Amino acid sequence: MIQNIQQSAQSILDTLHSAVLVINQQLCVEYMNPSAEMMFQISYARAKQRPLQELVIDETDFFTRLKRSLKTQHPFSAYEEDLTVRTGQVLALDYMASPIQYGNQPQCLLLELVSRGRHRKIAQEKHLLIQNEASRSLLRGLAHEIKNPLGGIRGAAQLLERKLDNEQDREFTTVIIREADRLKKLVDRMLGPRGVPHKRQLNIHKMLEHVRSLVQVETSKVKFIADYDPSLPDIYGDESMIIQAILNITRNAIREVSDDGEIIFRTRSIRNYTIGDNAYPLVAKIDIIDNGPGVPEDLKEKLFLPMVTGHAEGTGLGLSIAHTLINRHDGLIEFSCTPGYTTFSILLPLLTDPE
Ligand SMILES: Nc1ncnc2c1ncn2[C@@H]1O[C@H](COP(=O)(O)OP(=O)(O)OP(=O)(O)O)[C@@H](O)[C@H]1O
Ligand SMILES: [Mg+2]
């Protein structure tokens, strides 16, 4: 057993969610695992033998501690520290450094980094799911109560219409029927997506191109840029549901951007990612990025809840529906925004063995 474990040490490191690096006396990278590649957005092949200062920037304290630990051979830990990485992103991390020696190499330092931001996000996502489910069941009850009498009102208006000879009087019944239909449509949207998903293998890029062709008919002001990872495997899902989710997010982005608007569709795969309570070895990330002003501050916390809108003509259902649809695929939607760069990301597990 022990021998087997030792033999599979490499795959243990590959599967770890923590980023692991081995740093030599010159503070250059000797080794990094896939989670570290993800964290620093660089491949091991490129980072190997490069100074750690190229991955973590402007963090004098951090490097002073590493040097001290290498010199004194004392391990150390730091909690909830912010480190700026090479992409400019500031990561909230816990990290531990332990002196290590392998073979007849000089002493090195084993550095483990655990992202606190991710933990915080997982807790927020769980909270959002619970909130969303609670407001959905409230809406379901309300929608049911509205739909029954609404059918009655519409039916009665139709009967009345038949009995009216006067064209002017008929206008009133037409208004009743039209408004009842509008209300029914709204209530149906409020009820959210129903029906079981019909899942099959789907090419993400085909779906994105389909959405692009749909929305480009509606608007000519926006420039679309495709930044696809061609090696991304197919996902297993319901095509119309996933297209609907992408469409809802894209329509929002189009509304926000100005005349020189730009929307980027970007796809990437991420290794070792946790969604809800489940850790997945591989996840597809679909980013819809716009250069609009970003999500208003007062909406950020409740954006995915039904009936939350920043627009007078909006119903506030688009993102809530998208969230439910992606959730049915065990995925999630995240967003981040800085002015001129708003990203909505759909994350979907990539299963090698579909059920
Ligand atoms: N890309 C974005 N940039 C800035 N704000 C956004 C973006 N996407 C969504 N929002 C904000 O989130 C709100 C909620 O979006 P959501 O799609 O749920 O509802 P809506 O677009 O207002 O109405 P509906 O989609 O039902 O027609 C929007 O009204 C808008 O204020
Ligand atoms: Mg919308």
Image (cartoon, rainbow, N blue to C red):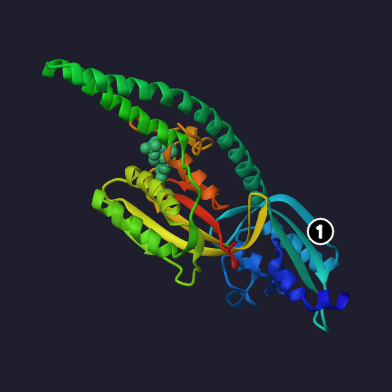
Residue 131 vertical position relative to residue 271 in the rendered view, above or below: above
Judged from the image, the secondary structure of the residue bearing numbered disc 1 is: strand
Crowd band around label 1 with a 10 angstrom C-alpha radius: few (<14), some (14–19), many (20+): some
* Picture quadrant where residue 75 is located: bottom right
At horizontal 54% and vertical 36% (from top left) the residue drawn is 301
For this rendering, which residue is in front, 235 or 81? 235
Q: Position of residue 194 (x, y in %)?
A: 48, 42
Mark 1: amino acid = Phe
* Picture quadrant where residue 74 is located: bottom right
At horizontal 71% and vertical 64% (from top left) the residue drawn is 16
Camera sees residue 190: yes
Q: Quadrant of ligand 1?
A: top left
At horizontal 62% and vertical 42% (from top left) the residue drawn is 124
Camera sees residue 101: no
- In the picture as drawn, the residue positioned furthest to the right comes out as 2
Residue occupied by mark 1: 76
Q: Position of residue 252 (x, y in %)?
A: 37, 44
Q: How many marks?
A: 1
Residue 216 vertical position relative to residue 4 in the rendered view, above or below: above
Asked if residue 83 lies left or right of residue 69, the reply is left
Q: Position of residue 135 (x, y in %)?
A: 54, 31
For this rendering, which residue is in front, 290 or 183? 183
Which quadrant holds the N terminus? bottom right
For this rendering, which residue is in front, 98 or 172? 172
* Picture quadrant where residue 169 is located: top left
Which quadrant holds the C terminus? bottom right
Instruction: Kindly tell me whether mark 1's CB lies below 8 Å from ligand 1.
Output: no
Residue 64 vertical position relative to residue 311 in the rendered view, above or below: below
At horizontal 76% and vertical 60% (from top left) the residue drawn is 65
Q: Position of residue 183 (x, y in %)?
A: 35, 27
